[in-house]
Every structure is written in structure tokens, then in C-alpha cells.
Amino acid sequence: MDGETDLAREMAALGARARAAAEALRETDGATRDAGLRAAAAALRARSAEVLAANAEDMAAAEARGLAPAMNDRLRLDAARLEAMAKGLEAVADQPDPLAGVLAEWDRPSGLHIRRAPSPIGVIGVIYESRPNVTADAGALCLKSGNAAILRGGSESARTAAAIHAALVEGLRAAGLPEDAVQRVPTTDRAAVGMMLADMADFIDVIVPRGGRSLVERVQAEARVPVFAHLEGICHVYVDAAADPRKAQRIAVNAKTRRPGICGAAECLLIDARDPAPGAGALRALLDAGVEVRGCPASQAMDNRVRPAAEDDFGREFLDMIIAARVVEGVDGAVAHIRRYGSSHTESIVTEDDAAAARFFARLDSAILMRNASTQFADGGEFGMGAEIGIATGKLHARGPVGAAQLTTFRYLVEADCALRP
């Protein structure tokens, strides 16, 4: 009980410091926040040996615990990934200030001049699992948008996250920003997560979970503040009868194999029954690339390497070199399948038919819809946001990649010259 009481006090103190930092950030300008991000990027490069050594320790511990290959890939850092992380901080700094200017303004006959202006949300709580880059991305996006961040990473990446967080704090200090603007929960005790969700509503304004289904379900069930989240990335690639066969093959293989363990990886290939040749070519290209394909009887007939699919293979997030396949009746068949099994994350149609693409876009309501593009582009950096804090599949406030602009709200600024309401 004493340990739990001590943790509760520690978390409350962390929350109070975050709230104070959030208020201080309201008075900063975009140039100062950007300077903090660039200084953090420089610190990350200067501390690269330290960060990679910490990551090596995390990787060794993960391998000893038998962590799944997809999770290992998410956890692993090398010099190239670390440099990409530093460049991501600089890319966020290069983005326009999401708090600058006004969203709209107008005058009323009553003499009121009204402006709707962007405003920080306040304190963002981020709960994530093994991806160490979330520490940098989340901290950067919260700072860019004038929010304080409370980061709680998983035990698998604890050493790496601590080393990255140290670089972020160094950047804040160099720019004269409050060091409490980006805080890291210093314990891997799971009770800290429960406290963030249920006991810190006075301090945390929004929770963003980054992880598997069990984590997100827990956050959505227990959180007493709004949540930006998606449960799973069950992404589809539909190869239309009017697809260019070579494009279909290249897109399907990239969508599945580039990084099979990320939420933008394709988990199901849909093939148009009206002319299955382009889709059959994509299916064979996946098999040739070493992907295990679990398909319906019609897709099994296309290649004897296709294994029979169980019903629960559709609507499943494999996060591995495995994909489901089904033959469907045109765009409407693809839409019906996605509506039943999808997670409202990302869907791609491969077609040269403008009408087919327009119907696909009109009838589906996933957060991201693509044409002739790999679902692996479902990423804030690829959308020009510099980075993302996650992909939101809900329909309120933020949707799709959550960048700095999506971490703002707005307020109304009203001015007049002694306006009185009759």
C-alpha cells in the first residue's frame, strides 16, 4: 500500500508540473519552440552512442523474453533510424506554427468583432509500447503545438526511451523552455497507466495510446478524458479489374513487406472477380516475396501455394509476413468486405478507372483512402506533417495522422467598443 501511495504522489506531482509547464508554453512563440526542437535534434545526434547502447540493452532483454519478430523490429534502432528520428524533430520544427494566425473572423451588427483562434489543448498523455521513436515524435509534436507531454513507454523500450528523453530535455533547456514540458513517467509499474487514465483528469486533457489492441481497449475502457486512438490497422489493398498489373504487384508487395509490423501494413488483398488477372499477379508477387497468403477458395485456385483461410483470418492484424486474400465482386464487393472486416484505418484501390476510384472513395469512411499507392504511406511524416503522434480512426476532432495541428483546439476572441446586448 505504501508503494502505491508513493506512486500516486509521484504521478500527481508529475501532473502538476506538466500543467504548470503547459501554462508557461502558452506564452512562448513558435520560433522559441522550434529552437527547442532543433536543439533536441542536435542533442540526439551528440548522444547517439548512448542511445544505441541503451537500445542494445533493450534488444537483448527483449530477445531473452522471446519478443515477437514484429515487436523486435519496432524496438530496434540503428544509426539510420536514429538519424531519421533527429531529422523528424527538425522536420517538425520546419512546419508552420499551428498556433499562429486566426482560423476565421467576422463582424456582427451588434458591434462584435469575433476571431476563432487556434489554442493548445493543454497536457497530452501518451501511452505506448515498444517503439522508441514515439518518445521523440510525441514530445516534438506536443511541444510544437504548445502542449506539455507526459510520456509513458513500455518496459521493452524503457532504457532507449530514457536516453531519447534526455536529449529532448537538453533541447528544452537550451531554448530556455520549461524542462517539465516533456516529462517521462519514470517507472514501468503498470499501476502508473491506471493512474494516468483514471486519477489524473485534473492534469491530463487527452490520452493518446500507441500499441496493440489490448492496450488501446484498456485505455478506451478506463480513460476519464478524451482518447485519440485506433484499435487495429486492418488495412486493405483492392486490385480492381482496371488495375495496371505491374502497379498492382509493386503496390501489394510494398504494402505488405516494407515493414509488416506497422499499423499501415496491408493485412488483406482483395481481387476483382470481373477480371482477376491483375489481382492474381499481385497475389503471386506476394508469394514470391515470401509472404504467406491465406485465401478463399477462388484465390487458392490462382496458385497452389495459397493456404486455406479461416474465417478469423479476415479482419485480423497479422503484423507479420502473412496476408489474407479474397476474390470479391467489383468495387461494391470490396466495400462490403471492408465495411465488415476493416478497422477504419487505411484502404487502397489499385485502378486506372476514375469512376471505380471515385466510387471506392465515396462509399468508404476509413480515416485514409488511397488510389494507386501503398498503405505504408499512412504516416504523418509522409503526409508532410514532419511526424505523427498516431493514427486516429475516430470521427471527432483528430482523424488520420495526428500531427501538431491536430493537437490544437480553438477559442473565440471577441472585441467591441462598449457593445451592450438589448
Image (cartoon, rainbow, N blue to C red):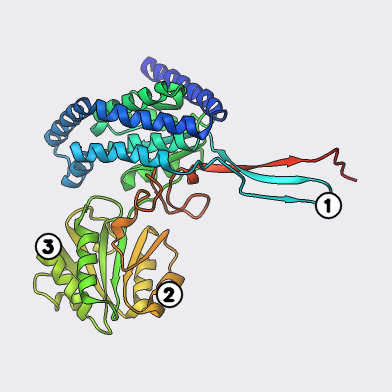
Q: Is residue 157 visible?
A: yes
Q: CA distance from mark 2 to mark 1?
A: 43 Å
Point out the frontmost of discs 1 and 3.
Answer: 1
The residue at 27%/26% (across/down) is 163
**Above-or-below relation of 135 to 213:** above
Closest to the observer: 298 or 149?
A: 149
Q: Earlier in the sequence, mark 2 or mark 1?
A: 1
Q: Amino acid at mark 1?
A: Pro
Q: CA distance from mark 1 to mark 3?
A: 67 Å
Closest to the observer: 86 or 324?
A: 86
Question: Could you say whether the residue bearing mark 3 is in a helix, strand or loop?
Answer: loop
- The dot on residue 295 is none
The residue at 38%/26% (across/down) is 171
**Residue labelled with disc 2:** 358
Residue 5 in the image: state x and y as whole percent.
Answer: 42, 18
Classify residue 112 by image quadrant.
Answer: top right
The residue at 62%/43% (across/down) is 117
Q: Residues within 10 Å of mark 1 (few under 14, many from 20)?
A: few
The residue at 32%/24% (across/down) is 166
Residue 365 in the image: state x and y as whole percent.
Answer: 45, 64
Q: Is residue 159 visible?
A: no
Q: Amino acid at mark 3?
A: Ala
**Residue labelled with disc 3:** 289
**Above-or-below relation of 185 to 390:** above
Q: Earlier in the sequence, mark 2 or mark 3?
A: 3
- The dot on residue 109 is 1
Question: Could you say whether the residue bearing mark 2 is in a helix, strand or loop?
Answer: helix
Q: Please state if 54 lies on the left or on the right of 403 as rendered.
A: left
Question: Could you say whether the residue bearing mark 1 is in a helix, strand or loop?
Answer: loop
Quadrant showing the N terminus: top left
Residue 304 in the image: state x and y as whole percent.
Answer: 9, 74
Q: CA distance from mark 2 to mark 3?
A: 31 Å
